[in-house]
Amino acid sequence: MDKIKFATVWLAGCSGCHMSFLDLDEWLIELAQFVEVVYSPVGCDLKHYPDNVDVCLVEGGIANEDNLELILQVRRQTKILISFGDCAVTANVPAMRNMLGGAEPVLKRAYLELGDTSPQLPYAPGIVPELLDRVLPVHEVVPVDIYMPGCPPPADRIRATIEPLLHGEMPAMVGRDMIKFG
């Protein structure tokens, strides 16, 4: 049996969705029989997103140039892309900075107005990614195949979303247990 090439990606979010994924506990051992984890911030130290990924869970919104570059690559190289958690689905808490009206006011507020001892703007080309003017949910940048809301999605919802995919079926994303936000 060929294993499914499986990936997870962490963009602008808190990693709570990935922590909830780890709450799958012993089912992770069963999952390992069906998938080859080819990219993830959890347990992998891979630097480049691979080609021909079958399923990818994307946590977080798109907040900076690095997030934007990665999500475009993920979409090109992934068959089934899942918006994983409220930040990916709606931009959620990271998008609260959108109220300030752009990257410049956000940086000034965070680093100059609220700076403690040595207020200065972060600037290190190639090290500190440039902020986008707005934090965007994944679907505003690339097409999404499955939406899995939750902050974070509970482990049973994650399993109910992934398990059908292991058998070549799409999950039924209906009802409170599968589509409740928060």
Image (cartoon, helix red, strand yellow):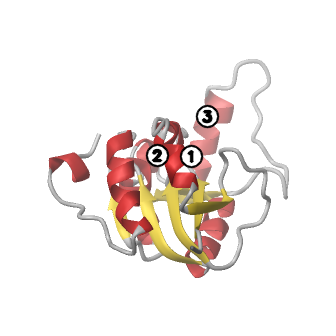
Mark seen at residue 105: 1
Closer to the camera in the image, 80 or 152: 80
Q: Secondary structure at mark 1?
A: helix
Q: Nearer the viewer, mark 1 or mark 3?
A: 3
Q: Earlier in the sequence, mark 3 or mark 2?
A: 2
- Amino acid at dot 1: Pro
SS at badge 3: helix
User: Would you place residue 175 above or below residue 22 in this image?
Assistant: below
Q: Residue at x 35, y 39 (%)?
A: 154
The reply to whether residue 151 is in sight is no
State left or right for residue 118 relative to residue 34.
right
Q: Where residue 3 sits in the image (x, y, percent)? A: 59, 69
Query: Quarter holding the N terminus?
Result: bottom right
Instruction: Residue at 63%, 40% (x, y): give it.
Output: 108
Circles 2 and 1 in contact, beta carbons < 8 Å? yes
| Residue designated by label 3 | 110
Q: Considering only order in the chain, which callout, 3 or 1, is on the residue closer to the N terminus? A: 1
Q: Quadrant of residue 131?
A: bottom right
Is disc 2 placed on a helix, strand or loop?
A: helix
Q: Earlier in the sequence, mark 2 or mark 1?
A: 2
Q: Position of residue 85 (x, y in %)?
A: 40, 49
Q: Look at mark 2 in the image and give the residue it sits on.
A: 100
Instruction: Please give the label number shown on residue 97.
Output: none
List x then y, in percent, for residue 36: 63, 62
Q: What's the CA distance linking mark 1 and mark 3?
A: 9 Å
